[in-house]
Image (tube, grey):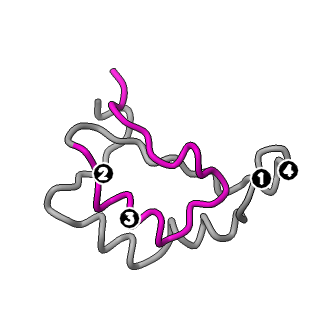
Amino acid sequence: RSNHFIFGLNDSGNMNLDLVLRFLRYLPPGVTEIYFHPASRVYPSLDRRGSDQEELSALTSPALRKALMAPDIQCIGFSDL
């Protein structure tokens, strides 16, 4: 079993809060993985555009937490599949 969709893979290192909130507004039905790599500064070859701090800030944002509480969004782990 696996996710049906993945968002953010092409935006690795640039997953800022505005982009993530936009992704959430357009989630298709099914299981979607949202890809983050907030430690990309540890591996410079992975750091293409943004900063690890920007992704960490997005992941820990109260605005993201609130958006994830929408009734049509359920946060799960792969073991839940």
Q: Secondary structure at mark 2?
A: loop
The label number, if any, that marks residue 47 in the structure image:
1
Q: Quadrant of the N terminus?
A: top left
- Left or right of residue 23, residue 12 in this image: right
Which residue is denoted by mark 4 in the rendering?
A: 44
Residue type at mark 3 is Arg
Viewer-side residue, 74 vs 44: 44
Q: Is residue 25 magenta?
A: yes
> Disc 3 or disc 4, which is closer to the eye?
3
Magenta segment: 1-28
In the rendered image, the vertical position of residue 30 relative to residue 61, given as above or below: above
Tag 2–tag 4 contact (CB < 8 Å): no
Q: Which residue type does callout 2 highlight?
A: Cys
**Disc 1 secondary structure class:** loop
Label 4 vs label 1: CA separation?
Answer: 5 Å
Q: Nearer the viewer, mark 1 or mark 3?
A: 3
x, y percentage for residue 6?
43, 39
Q: Which mark is residue 22?
A: 3
> Gap in Å between the C-alphas at discs 2 and 4?
30 Å
* Residue 20 on image: x %, y %: 44, 63
Q: Residue at x 30, y 51 (%)?
A: 75
Q: Are marks 4 and 1 in contact (CB under 8 Å)?
A: yes
State which mark lies toward you, 2 or 4.
4
